Image (spheres, grey):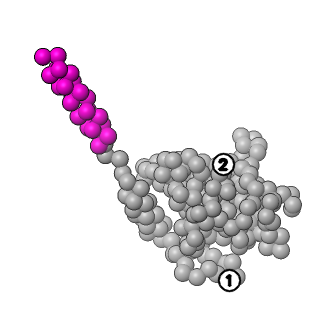
């Protein structure tokens, strides 16, 4: 009798474990599809034009974005900055941003920034390790790898706006699968400050 009771208890525990492991979490492929749909919706709603070719003169219209093929990051150069002074390998880069919005909910219109010197006296920083792509983004752990993408085009005091897929976002964005939009990202290079 005791053996039957133990057997029933273990069977019920096994079913409970199987039941809890079969929750409705999305696969990574499903999360990527959701992100693609969210970005496409954002592009349509904001009447953005995605350029096939990068403008050689660095001039973008306000609604034009270039999608970097190596990272999937979309960006628009607002101000190219001092292109005679490009960032160097090993140089510290200071980042101020405003208009940060998350794609997690269309109802959430909260914007974040770090450009108020009183509430945020210190900018975000990272050491430039070269151009970023999906396979070497770990070189930029502790920051947002997507911020590095425009640096091959702009110079000191350059300003961009960008759409950053979650896999090129901060570690928090990567863990929560949060795609972001930055209305304004400003760069300063240590050697020029």
| In this view, 180 is above or below 132 | above
User: x, y percentage for residue 119?
Assistant: 71, 40
Left or right: 117 with respect to 138? right
Taking the image as shown, residue 155 lies to the left or right of residue 58, namely right
Q: Is residue 158 visible to the viewer in this orientation of the structure?
A: yes
For discs 2 and 1, the disc positioned in front in the rendered view: 2
**First in residue order: circle 2 vs circle 1:** 1
Label 2 element class: loop
Outermost top residue: 2
- From mark 2 to mark 1, how far is it between C-alphas? 32 Å
The tally of labels here is 2
The x, y position of residue 188, in whole percent, is 78, 59
Q: Mark 1: which secondary structure?
A: loop
Q: Residues within 10 Å of mark 2 (few under 14, many from 20)?
A: few
Residue identifier under label 2: 142
Residue corresponding to mark 1: 56
Q: Magenta span has 76?
A: no
| 14 in relation to 106, above or below | above
Query: Which residue sits at x=21%, y=21%?
Result: 6
The residue positioned 55% from the left and 78% from the top of the image is 51
Percent of width and height locating residue 76? 62, 70
Residue 116, percent from left and from top: 72, 46
Residue 114 left/right relative to 171? right
Residue at figure coordinates x 87%, y 60% from the top left = 191
Q: Which residue is drawn at 65% across and 65% down?
A: 132
Task: Look at the image and give the residue range highlighted in magenta.
Answer: 1-22
């Amino acid at each position: 009798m005791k053996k039957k009771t133990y057997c029933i208890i273990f069977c019920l525990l096994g079913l409970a474990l199987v039941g809890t492991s079969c929750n409705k979490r999305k696969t990574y492929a499903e999360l990527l599809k959701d992100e693609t749909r969210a970005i496409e919706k954002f592009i349509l709603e904001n009447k953005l034009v995605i350029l096939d070719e990068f403008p050689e003169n660095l001039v973008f219209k306000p609604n034009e974005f270039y999608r970097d093929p190596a990272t999937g990051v979309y960006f628009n150069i607002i101000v190219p900055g001092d292109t005679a002074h490009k960032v160097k390998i090993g140089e510290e880069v200071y980042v101020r941003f405003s208009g940060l919005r998350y794609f997690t909910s269309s109802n959430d219109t909260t914007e974040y920034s770090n450009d108020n010197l009183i509430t945020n006296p210190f900018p975000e920083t990272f050491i430039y390790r070269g151009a970023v792509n999906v396979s070497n983004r770990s070189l930029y752990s502790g920051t947002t790898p997507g911020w590095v993408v425009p640096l091959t085009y702009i110079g000191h005091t350059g300003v961009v706006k960008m759409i950053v897929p979650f896999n090129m976002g901060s570690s928090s964005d990567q863990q929560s699968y949060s795609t972001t939009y930055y209305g304004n990202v400003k760069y300063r290079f240590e050697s020029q400050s």
